[in-house]
Amino acid sequence: MGKSGRPTLLQQQKIVKDLKKYFLKSYSVETTAHITGYNTKTVYKYFRIWSEELRKRDDTSFQDIMKI
């Protein structure tokens, strides 16, 4: 039976490193989970965080442009 629970900091860093390249290439959550072997909920969690960061950055850029 596999170990479950919260990953260690080193494991989290590895997850981020493994998943970020698929996020940047616009892979879906399901495809990324299938390729990497990570649970879809784990992949979704990180993809959601990164998507929100990009959206906030885009909103700020748009607001700066509109001030001109």
Image (cartoon, grey):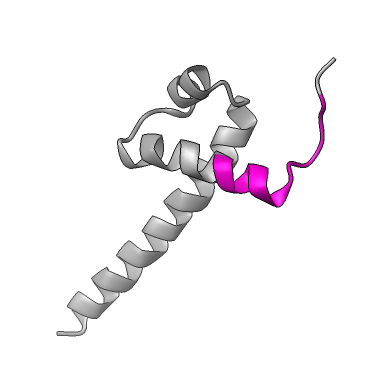
What residue sits 81% from the left and 29% below the top?
4
Image quarter where the C terminus lies is bottom left
The answer to which image quadrant residue 38 occupies is: top right
Q: In the image as oriented, which residue stretches furthest toward the bottom?
A: 68
Residue 6 x %, y %: 78, 42
Image quarter where the N terminus lies is top right
Q: Is residue 25 left or right of residue 46?
A: left
| Numbered marks: total | 0
Residue 11 colored in magenta in the image: yes
Residue 25 colored in magenta in the image: no
Residue 12 x %, y %: 63, 45
Range of magenta residues = 3-14
Q: In the image as oriented, which residue stretches furthest toward the front?
A: 10
Residue 42 x %, y %: 62, 35
Q: In the image as oriented, which residue stretches furthest toward the left?
A: 68
Q: Is residue 18 left or right of residue 21?
A: right
Residue 2 x %, y %: 80, 20
What residue sits 44% from the left and 59% below the top?
53
What residue sits 82% from the left and 36% below the top?
5
What residue sits 33% from the left and 42% below the top?
24
Vertical placement of 10 versus 55: above or below?
above
